[in-house]
Image (tube, rainbow, N blue to C red):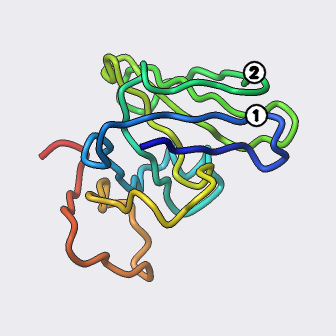
Amino acid sequence: MKYTGSCFCRAITYHFELASPDEAFTSICHCRNCKKFTGAENSMAIKIPRATFTYLTGAPRTHAADNGSGTLVTREFCAECGSGIMEYGEHAGDYTYVFHGSLDDPNILPPKMEFFLKYKAPWQPVIPGITHRQEHKE
């Protein structure tokens, strides 16, 4: 299956291909680092094999920073509109995390897990039917 996406201004477009939607792992992160980058109460990203991802137009800008645990996370985003496209870190191996909101069809690849719930705002609802963790790894 082919999935497409872009930044807000469409200067950057991309696609990735998966044999099955089961190859993707969509999760919601409530850590403070993700909140700061997205400017939102959480971040939702799709873990996919890096080799399946291709930029079609444009070239992202990158920024690397400590993710709060002593390891680096690199984020790629549009230099024109600021939209996040993906992130990856030292522990991601051959995977990358594509920001769910950059997909052309936001109704696909629903979340399977929520983590860093200890930082989740108390007014946010619990999503039923997915895994919930107080930390990233428990």
Residue furthest to the left in view is: 138
Residue 59: which disc? 2
As measured in the structure, the alpha-carbon distance from the residue carrying label 2 to the one carrying label 1 is: 7 Å
* Residue 77 rendering spot, x and y as whole percentages: 69, 33
Name which of mark 2 and mark 1 comes first in the sequence: 1
Identify the image quadrant of the N terminus.
top left
The residue shown at (39%, 78%) is 122
Q: Please, what is the three-letter code of the amino acid marked with disc 2?
A: Ala
Q: Nearer the viewer, residue 65 or 28?
A: 28
Q: Is residue 98 above or below residue 116?
A: above
* Residue 83 rendering spot, x and y as whole percentages: 72, 44
Q: Nearer the viewer, residue 57 or 128?
A: 57
At numbered mark 1, what does the secondary structure look like: helix, strand or loop?
loop
The residue shown at (48%, 49%) is 32
Q: Assess whether mark 1 and mark 2 are in contact (beta carbons under 8 angstroms).
A: yes
Q: Please, what is the three-letter code of the amino acid marked with disc 1?
A: Ile
Q: Nearer the viewer, residue 127 or 56?
A: 56
Which corner quadrant of the image does residue 75 belong to? top right
Q: Horizontally, is 121 left or right of 61 in the view?
A: left
User: Dot 2 surroundings within 10 Å: few (below 14), some, or many (20 or more)?
Assistant: some
Residue 27: which disc? none
Q: Which residue is mark 1?
A: 12
The residue shown at (48%, 25%) is 73
